Amino acid sequence: MTLRTKLLASTSALLIASTGALYADAHATHPETGEALASDQTFVYRDLDESPSIDPGLAEDSAGGDILRDLFEGLYNQDAAGNLAPGVALSHTVSDDNLTYTFTLRDNAMWSNGDRVTAGDFEYAWKRAASPELASPYSWFIELMALENASEVIAGDADPSELGVTAIDDTTLEVRLVQPLPYFAQMLTHFTTFPVHQPTVEEFGSDWTKPGNMVSNGAYVLTEHVPQEKLVRARNEMYWDNENTIIEEVTSLVINDENVALTRYLAGELDRTDVPAGQFPRLAAEYPEQAVSVPLSCSYYYMFNLRDGAPDEIQNADVRKALSLAIDRDIIVENVLAGGQEPAYTFTHWATAGFETPDIPMATMTQEERNAMAVELMTAAGYGPDNPLEIDLVYNTSESHKSVAVAVSQMWKQTLGVETVLANQEWQTFLEARSNGDYEVARGGWCADYNEASTFLDLMQSESGYNDSKYVNPEVDDLLAEAKTSSNAQANYDAVEEFIAQDTPIIPIYHYASVKMFAENLEGWPFENFQQNWYSKDLYKIAE
Amino acid sequence: MLSFVVRRLAVAIPTLLILVVLSFILMYSAPGGPFNSERPLPPEVLANIEAKYGLDQPFWKQIVNYVSGVVTSFDFGPSFQYKDRTVNDVIAQGFPVTLTYGFWSFVVAVTVGVSLGVAAAIKQNSWLDYLAVGISIGAQVLPNFVMAPILLLVFTLWLGWLPGGGWEGGQWNYLIMPVIALSTSYMASIARITRSSMLEVLNTNFIRTAQAKGLPMRRVIWRHAMKPTILPVLSYLGPAFVGMITGSVIIDVFFSTGGIGQFFVNSAFNRDYSVIMGITILVGTLTILFNLLVDILYAWIDPKIRY
Amino acid sequence: MFPNRAAVEGVGEAMELAEVKGRSLWADARTRFFRNRAAVVSLIMLMLVAGFALFGGAFAEYENDFVDFSLIGSNAYKGVPSVETGHYFGTDSNGRDLFARTVQGTGISLMVGVVGALVAVIVGTLYGATAGYYGGRVDGLMMRIVDVLMSIPFMFVLILMLVIFGRSIFMLFLGIGLISWLDMARIARGQTLTIKNKEFVEVAVATGVHPVKIILRHIVPNLLGIVIVYATLLVPNMIIFESFISFLGLGVQEPATSLGALINEGSRTMQFGYYWQIAYPLFFFVVTIFAFFFVGDGLRDALDPKDR
């Protein structure tokens, strides 16, 4: 064979091979949409920090939740819009008194080692999560679910076996509540309710979550975990819906610095990352297909300390209201954050399901009118240029909290002549100061546990453990209690929001948005999902 | 010599004890516990957790338990923050990483620094000298939290030559940027010290004699001048080594290497007492050992020194 | 990270030498210092930087905490450095005048450097002189304590302290000072051992002068040269140190700032093209540190007449 023919032969071989690959690639299409799929189906995304735990019973942060929703599957999943979709459970029935739920489980759900997923696995997992022996920081979630005996079990007054959950047979799970919870089924998409594999947990103890030991029932299995660096999960061949999983491998990389993460995203190392505060407009202009902002179920606010013994000047509702009025929320959302957040005049996030934002007078005024009213209120309260109010504002260390605090303190100074002393504290000190009432004004953020207005407004209840303002208003308590059983709670929520606007125990500032960069060829992201609960099994990459 | 080593080691033990007690007291008096979160835990849940980690016991008992655990079984206890892991797990994973890039940074800093310093001294007041001095001061002045993002922009985003972070078991392309960012300022200091030390040595009588005898310059430098030149450099190596271990905080933040520095800072912020204690003891032990090693080297090179 | 001990110790020997020759060491040193061009230029630069920190505020058109709301989020085209708008150095990401902030940050950084070095030098000198003067068992004990403290990873302890006691400038000074006096103590002790045997000290001891007085009146003044050199070389290291603390978010409280904090903020927006946000603070940072290094080197060479 001459050199020339050799070359020719190898070229044609190459041609055949490459067309072959093309041909194969062209055949991979999405089963529903018919889009051509990319040959590389890996998804790499950034996490801010290492999650405290990836044990469903012990996990406590939302990034850990993202990982757990891939590794495990609970009774229900959420679909792209955030509605319930069948998970291990196919359906459920509720007793007439709304206290007993009976779930029917699918019989083809498998653990990654080939064992069947049974109702008993759920019973074991829930009792484990509540047990004082495991001492999970998230055991309160079981209490929140209002399971029979949950509080007693957590307090150690009852044996975990007395928890209100029973596996009737392999595919039937019975759950007993102590009070009706309209959103109970919604709560079952949360990671604390995911099943765990009893033999594995018992064999390895606390080492069971390490790669190689872990047995899971989700669409993916854990293959590699280097704390503070990365966590890799690969397709679970035993998953009941495995043939519809498209992404082969998911990697979460821990990258502490958001600017570094953005650099690495732009260098093509990541498929998803966060947009640093203030950078959304620029990135959206430059990469319109990639920069995305969608509402996220959290509210950002400042709280006043209303305890006895807290500084006097902020016990005056007019002063508090003036401070609230003087904050130009439009500047904060449009200029400081600039990531599609919405100005907040109500505590409840505007996009919360079934919630109509009430007409708070302040919301419809112009900022000039607000400022004028604020000055009026302040003057009436006896503060002015010759008697300036002094306020301490604490926030936890973070670039964006700092930016908001700096802007707010200047708005107060420029409009009302208020002197603000800023103090940033690192997280644990901050939390301690806030729950001990060792502050005047403090930053707060609250994220919905479930998609309903009471998840926010219950914080205003006098006895709520999360009411760090210690706002006490019997009327609000009554309205909230009534809302629990009322068929139309909107009127109650409107009234509570009115009270918040009038008494100003907190200053709602903005409603969060999730601001991210997504690789152009990544499809299937549940942008409509208010809690941004996503499942890698629903994602796919299209061929470019 | 032997008695010196023994004496130093004898001091090391109370030092470590002081370190343990000091950091334990510091952590204990810190506001905020390891289990606070945005959503305060119900008291009964908190009680369960505290019982699990023995935090419900009196202070003295906690510290005694802790120290005896460390001394008898090398057990630093469970991590409060990373609930699936023990402190030993955390250290076993993070420490080799820090040690690897720390070691290479050390090698680079010493070899490049000493060569640069010697070259500058031999060619004093030449362009090479000025260049070396310029580079070394520039490198010393640029904070490494500025250098790290610049490296990332240049090598990852613009040139696309190097991965922007991660460790991957310490492959060479993941090592380059951490080593550059960590070693530069130490390299600069070493170069400056070497240069001035070498200049001083070159002016001493015995070197002048050697030169006068007509020995070639290279030989004079290598056989005679190098040893006394290296002494001040040696005494800098102890602090430099400690600096590199603590400097790993910045490396871990920017290059996501997962070393001990990031764990330390996170744990301090999260009040993860046991991890903080574990890392502090580890770094303290290393510091003591390293300083001892430097002292022994010093005595070996310069027999005039007696302890 | 701290000035090299061996490099400073030569100064002590030189001072003894001068003593022997009976010439005024200080006059000599001054002449030598002013012959060193790099050191003189650096000294002038230092004075300019200090002047900038002290009086720069008078030229600023804005307060360092004043936020121009129309400029937030539009840095790229409106917050650029410009004489017309009065933002000579542009604005930071929060719409504040970078000139005023740089002035203020330079002031804080200089203060941290100088006060930190001062704390270290005072504590270290007194400690070292006391140990050296008494000698014997006291010396042994005091120096063992220094040895013990030296092997504590102080960066870690400082992080713990700032986390635990909350951040404040006082804490920063205390922490930084605490870390850096150890080397000074060793140097001071070594020098004291030789000074102690000088006639004037022996005379003082013989006439029954109180030891505290001897240390303060006779020993410490004779350590001055070495102390000054060490302190000058310590200042830039303190400034670098503070910048690291700022990077961790444990530095001074808003709206106050330091060069380290400004550089840290600037390095975050560098990739978006807001180069001025890092350029100006970094310039002052670099100039200050360069100048201190050169002045320190110049002082050392001037006080140590060995021809280098």
Image (cartoon, coloured by chain):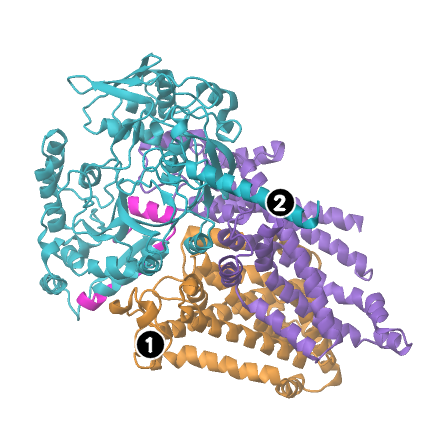
- Where does residue C53 sit, x and y in percent of width and height? 42, 77
Labels 2 and 1 within one chain: no
Residue type at the position of mark 2: Ser
The segment highlighted magenta reads: A413-440
**Mark 1 Cα-neighbour bin, 10 Å: few <14, some 14–19, many ≥20:** many
- Locate residue B168 relative to residue A263 in the image: left or right: right
What chain letter is assigned to the residue under label 1?
A: C
Q: How many labels does the image show?
A: 2
Which structural element holds mark 1? Answer: loop
C180 or B258, nearer to the observer: B258
**Mark 2 Cα-neighbour bin, 10 Å: few <14, some 14–19, many ≥20:** few
Residue B149 appears in view: yes
CA–CA distance in space, label 2 to label 1: 66 Å
Q: Colour of chain C?
A: orange
| Residue displayed at 12% across by 33% down | A483
| Residue displayed at 10% across by 38% down | A490
User: Quick one: which chain is purple?
Assistant: B
Residue A10 has which mark? 2
- Where does residue B87 sit, x and y in percent of width and height? 53, 37
Which structural element holds mark 2? Answer: helix
Image vertical order of residue A200 relative to residue C144, above or below: above
Would you name the residue on which mark 1 appears?
Answer: C87
Q: Chain A is drawn in which colour?
A: cyan
- Locate residue B200 relative to residue A418 in the image: left or right: right
Image vertical order of residue B70 relative to residue C146, above or below: above
- Locate residue A426 relative to residue C192 in the image: left or right: left
Assess whether residue C11 is covered by the magenta stretch. Answer: no
Q: Which residue lies furthest to the right in this view?
A: B213
